[in-house]
Image (spheres, rainbow, N blue to C red):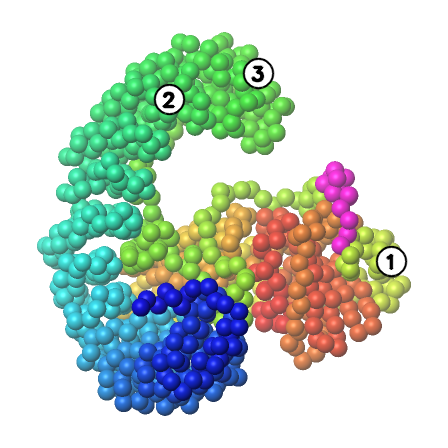
Amino acid sequence: MSDSKYFQTTKKGEIHELKEELLSQREDKKKEAVKKVIAAMTVGKDVSMLFTHVLNCMQTHNLELKKLVYLYVMNYAKNHPDRAILAVNTFQKDASDPNPLIRALAVRTMGCIRVDNITEHLCEPLRHALKDQDPYVRKTAAVCVAKLYDVNPELVENQGFLNILNDLLGDSNPMVVANAVASLTEIDEVSKKEVFRIHSGNLNKLLAALNECTEWGQVFILNSLCKYTPRDSQEAENVCERVAPRLQHANSAVVLSAVKVLMKYMNSISNNDVIRLFCKKMAPPLVTLLSKEPEIQFLGLRNINLIVQKRPEILQYEMKVFFCKYNDPIYVKMEKLEIMIMLANEKNIEEVLLEFKEYATEIDVEFVRKAVRAIGRCAIKIDRASERCIQVLLDLIQTKVNYVVQEAIIVIKDIFRKYPNKYEGIIATLCANLESLDEPEAKASMIWIIGEYAERIDNAHELLNSFLEGFKDENSQVQLQLLTSIVKLFLKRPKDAQQMVQTVLNLSTQESDNPDLRDRGFVYWRLLSTDFEAAKAVVLSEKPLITDTTSHLDESLLNELILNISTLASVYHKPPETFVTKLKGLNKRGLRNKEEEDEDEPDYVDDDNMNNQQSGQPQQQQQQQYQQQQQGGYQQQQPKSGNLIDLDLSDLGGALPNTNNNYGNNNNMYSPQQQQQQQFNGNSNDLSFLGGGGVEVQAPVNKVVVFGGDRSQAIQISGAFTRFQGRINLELNLLNTSQQGMSKFKIQFYQNSFGISPADQILSCGAIEVGQSTDVTIPIACNGQITNPLNPVIDMAMMVLPSQERFYFKMNFPLLCLLTETGRLDRESYLSMWKSIPESNERSVEIQVRLPHVDVESILRRLNSKNIFEIVRKKAPNQEISFLSCKTESSVYILIELAFNISTSTCRCSSKTTSPDIMQLFEHNLNLLINNQI
C-alpha cells in the first residue's frame, strides 16, 4: 500500500495514540508509528513532544526503522540538544556496526546534527570511518568532514581531518576520491588558508579517478583541475588529452566542466596545431547543448558567449546552429542573436543578414528590436558589409511598421557616426518617417541626424521647429538633443535658426527643472555670446568614430569568467564574489566573522557601478539646503519619544550653549574647539601644537600581504588603503620573487561598491630587480557614488611588464577613508540637519568597549583623526554623551550620538543619515575604531 495514507488528515488525540504505538513491543507497529510521526513532521506539524519516545526506537536492527528515527533526530536535535545527547551512545555503537550501510548512516546523521555537544563525540567515529575498509563508508565520511568544518573549523584542523582528506585523494575507489575533492573544495572556499592544492603528485591520481567515478564526481574533479597551473606545454597537452573524452558525456555539466579545463590549459600549450585540434573537438559537444531543453540551451548559450569571445575559432563554422527556431523561447532567441553577431564575418554576413531580416518580421516586439539593432551592429563591426546592412534597414523602413522604423533610425544614427559622409543619401527617406516617431530614443536619434547634417537638409529648420513646439512635454533625452541640434543649425545657418536658438535657450535655462539641460543651455549661451568662432570649434568639432561593442567584457574579467564556466558566474557574467558572500576573503578580511553572522542581515554583494556624478558640495551650501528643507515642511515632523537628543536638544538642560558662549564656564561641558586650543588639533597626525608651522606627517602604514604570501608566485604584494591630506591613496609594497627583473607595472580595479579606481593605472615606480622590493603610493580617484548592496572587498589585477603576466588579488576598502576633512558641523546646522532627516532613518546599536579602561577622551581623539568630529559633549553621573558628525566624499552627512556608560563598558550609538544603507558597514568600522583595532 502507498505511503500517502500517512499524510491524510489526522484526528484529535492522535499524539497520545502515537505514544502508545511507539512504546509497543512489536517492531512493525513501531515502524508504522514512526512513519506517521515523520509524515506529520513533513507537513509542518510540531511533533517534538515525541522526541524521547522516538529516540527509544533507535535500538533496532531494522534498517528502515533506523533511517526514519535518524531523520527525526536530525530535524529536532537543534531544538532539543539536551535530549539529543542521549542518542550519542547509539550513534557510536552504530558507527562500529558490521553492516557498512549502518556505519555510514550513523556517521552521516551525526554530521547533519549541528549541535556542539554531539560534534565533540563525532571525532573518533569519523576518524575510524575515514579509514574504514568499505569505500561506501569512506566516501560518506569524506563529505561529513565538510559538514563538521562548517560547524567547528578549529576542531577539524586540530584533529588532522584535513590531512586525512588529502590522503584520500589517492584512494583506490574513484567515488571516495570524488567526495574527498568535493569536501576539500567546499572547505577551501571558506577557509582562511589554502587547504586544497593540486600538485604533480596528486594530479595523476585525480585524472585516473576521472574515468571511473559518477558524473557528479567527474564534475568535482574537473572543477578542481582548474586550480592547477601546468608546469610546461607538454604537461598541459597530456592533461587535455585525458580530459577530452569527457566532452562526449551525456551530462551537460560534465561537458561544460571539461570545456572549462581545456580552455584554461590551452593557454599553456605552445603548439598551435594542438590548440586547433582541441578547438575542433570542443565544437560538437557545444553544438549538442543546443538540442536539449530550453533551460539547458540558455545556460549553454551564456557559456558559449564567453567561449566565443575568448576563442571565436571554436564555433566559426557553426553559425547555422544558432539560427532561431519558431518555437524557441524569447530568452534563448536573444542569446542566439548575441552569438550570431559575434560570429558574423565577411564570409557568412549574407546569410546572417537574411536571418536578421526575417526576425524583424516576427511578432515579439522586443525580439524584433534586438534583430534590427543586430543589423546595425554588424554594419559597425564589418566595414565591407555596411552598405548591404544599410539596404536591409531601408527595406525594413519601407514596411512602415512603427517600432521597426524607429529602431532602424536609431541604428542608422550609429552607422552615420561610424561612417561619416558616406551614406547621407538616405536622409531623405528617414525624414519622410518623422510622423511615426513617438519613442524618446528614436526622436533623439532623428534630431541628431538633422542637426549633424543641417547644411544638407534644406528644411532642417522646419523639421527641428516641429519638435520645438512640444519641447516642455518631451523626454529629457530629446530635450538635450534638440538643444544641441538647434545650436548646430544656428552655427551652420544663422539666419534660419536665430529665433529658434533664442527660444530653446530660454526654455532650457529659465523654464526647465532639469539641471543637466540648464547647465548645457548656459554653456551654449555663454559660448555663443562670447565668441562665435570658438563656439563653432567646440560644437562642430570632429567626433571620434564609434567602434564595435560586441565583445563588451574586459579581458581580465573574461579570463576570470572562463575559469568559472558551468557556474552561476558564467550565467550572470559577473565574478562570483559579487553575488556570493561565503567565499575566501570575506571571512578572512571582510566585515563579519563566521560566528558573528546574522542570518537576517542583508548580504554584502556587489552591483554595477552607477554613472559618475560630481560631488564635493561645500559644507555651507549643504547646510543651507538642509535649512531650506526644514523651512519647506520638514519642521512638521515630531521628535521620537525617548530620543536623548530630541531634535531641539531641550532635554539636555541647555547643555548646548550658543556659539559665542564660553565653554570653560561649565565644568561638565567640553568644547572640541577649546580642547584643540589647550592641547592639540584632534588629528593625531597634526603636529602644529609643537610649533614650527604645523607640518603634517603621515603615520606609519600597516600593510597586509594580499598576494604571494608563501612566495610561490612571481611577486609578493602588500598594501593598505589610507587617507592623507584630503586624498585617498593605496600604499603598496612590491617584492620581486621571480627569476627576472620587472620594469613596469599596471594596476586595475574592477567595478566596486565605492566607485573608486586608480587615478593612473601605470604605477610611478622604477624597475625592480630579482629579490628587491619597492614602495609605491597610488592616488585613488573616487566618483562619490556608493552603490548598494555594499561589498567592502575590491577585486584588483596587477600586470607586470615585460612578461605581461597578470596577478589577481582582493583588498578590503575601509569606509572611513571616504570621510572628508570638512565633516564638522556647528550646533545650529547639526540641529536643523537632524530635524530634516526622516525618523525612519534613525538607527541605534550598542557597542561593547573591549578596552581595559574606558577613556572617552582618547576614543574621541581617535575618531577625530578619522574625520569623525565632536560637536559637543555632556557629562552625567557614570556617563558621557558626545554628539558628532562626519561627511563622505559624496556629501552624505552622518550624525552620531555616542553615550558611554563607564560602569558597564558599553557605548550606545544612535545615528541619522540620508543614506541609511551605508550605516551597517559604518557601525562596524566605528566599533573597530572605538576599540582601537584600526
**Magenta part of the protein: which range?**
627-640
| In magenta segment, residue 933 | no
Residue at the disc numbered 3: 502
Type of amino acid at the residue the image marks with label 1: Gly
Q: Position of residue 694 (x, y in %)?
A: 67, 61
Q: Compared with residue 361, is residue 758 higher up or lower down, i.e. above or below?
A: below
Foreground residue among 110 and 319: 110
Q: Identify the image quadrant of residue 851.
A: bottom right
Residue at the disc numbered 2: 402
Q: Compared with residue 486, is residue 229 higher up or lower down, i.e. above or below?
A: below
Q: Between marks 2 and 3, how big is the CA–CA gap?
A: 33 Å
Kindly check if marks 1 and 3 are in contact, taking CB atoms under 8 A apart as contact.
no
Position of 478 compared to 902: left or right?
A: left
Of circles 2 and 3, which is in front?
2
Please tell me whether mark 1 sits on a helix, a strand or a loop: loop
Type of amino acid at the residue the image marks with label 3: Gln
Residue at far right of view: 665
Residue 593 can be seen in this image? no
Position of 241 compared to 906: left or right?
A: left
Residue at (33, 15) in percent of width and height: 429
Q: Quadrant of the N terminus?
A: bottom left
Q: Between marks 1 and 2, how big is the CA–CA gap?
A: 70 Å
Q: Between marks 1 and 3, how big is the CA–CA gap?
A: 57 Å
Type of amino acid at the residue the image marks with label 2: Asn
Q: Which mark is residue 654?
A: 1
Residue 299 can be seen in this image? yes
Considering only order in the chain, which callout, 3 or 1, is on the residue closer to the N terminus? Answer: 3
| Few, some or many residues within 10 Å of mark 2 (<14, 14–19, 20+) | some
| Few, some or many residues within 10 Å of mark 1 (<14, 14–19, 20+) | few
Q: Quadrant of the C terminus?
A: bottom right
